[in-house]
Image: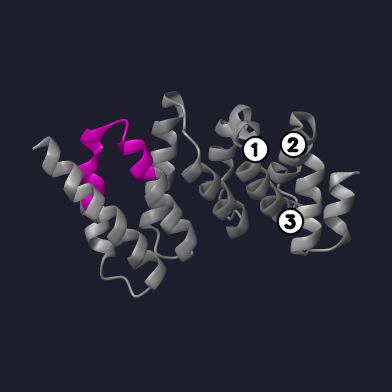
Amino acid sequence: MNIKEQLIVEHSKANSLKIVKYIGDDAGKFEELFALFIKNEPIISQRAAFVLDHSCVQNPQLIAPHLSDLIDNMIIPNQHNSIIRSSVRVLQEYKIPEELQGKAIEYCYLLLRDYKQPIAIRAFSISVIYNITNDFPKLKPELLLTIQDLLNDESPGLKNRSNKVYNKLKREIAQYS
C-alpha cells in the first residue's frame, strides 16, 4: 500500500483505520506516515493526523524517534487544528523525555492560554503540562494558578479537564507543603 495514495482515496474513519492496520508496529511504514504528517501538505497532513494518532495509541514506541519534530510541528504558524490536536493528544499519552519537556511545556502553555484554540487542544495541553509536572513538582503551583482561570470557562470539556487536574494538583501541592 502507498500510504499517500490511500490517504487521498477518501477521508473516512474506515480508510484511516485501514492505514493504521497496514502500518501496525512497522517503524518504516510509520516513518512514511510521519513524513506525510509533517510535510505541511494540507489535505494529506490533516488526514495523516488521524492515522498518526491512532497508530501511536496502538504502538506508542513508534513516535519516540520523532518526538522533537512532533513538538516543533504543532507550533508552526497557521498550522491546521487537526495537526495540533493530534500532536498534543499523542503527547498527553507519552512519557516525554526530559530533554524535550521544556519545549513541550512552553508550547502547551502557549496553546492553553490562546483562547482562540479549540477546546480539545487546550484540554490536551493541560494534560501534557500536568504530566510533566510529575517530574518537576515545583511547576505544579504555576499550573494550578493557570487552571484557576479556566474553571469558569463556558466549555464543559475544558471545565471538566480543568476541574480534574485542579483537584489533583491541590492534593499534591498539599502533600509537599
Q: Nearer the viewer, mark 2 or mark 3?
A: 2
Q: CA distance from mark 1 to mark 2?
A: 10 Å
**Mark 2 crowd level (few <14, some 14–19, many ≥20, 10 Å Cα):** many
Identify the residue position indicated by label 2 in the image: 30
Query: Image point 25% across, 38% down: which residue?
Result: 139
Q: Earlier in the sequence, mark 1 or mark 3?
A: 3
Q: Quadrant of the N terminus?
A: top right
- Camera-side residue of 108 and 94: 94
Assess whether residue 141 is covered by the magenta stretch: yes
Q: Position of residue 68 (x, y in %)?
A: 55, 31
- Camera-side residue of 42 and 105: 105
* Quarter holding residue 60: top right
Describe residue 33's horizontal placement relative to residue 6 as left or right.
Answer: left
Q: Earlier in the sequence, mark 2 or mark 3?
A: 2
Residues in magenta?
129-144
Q: Earlier in the sequence, mark 1 or mark 2?
A: 2
Marking on residue 168: none
Q: Nearer the viewer, mark 1 or mark 2?
A: 1
Identify the residue position indicated by label 1 in the image: 59
Query: Image point 76% across, 39% down: which residue?
Result: 24
**Mark 1 crowd level (few <14, some 14–19, many ≥20, 10 Å Cα):** some
Q: Nearer the viewer, mark 1 or mark 3?
A: 1
Identify the residue position indicated by label 3 in the image: 47
Residue 153 shows in this picture: yes
Residue 117 shows in this picture: no
| Numbered disc 1: secondary structure | loop
Q: Position of residue 140 (x, y in %)?
A: 23, 42
Q: Quadrant of the C terminus?
A: top left
Q: CA distance from mark 1 to mark 3?
A: 19 Å
Amino acid type, callout 1: Asn
- Camera-side residue of 156 and 85: 156
Q: Position of residue 67 (x, y in %)?
A: 57, 33
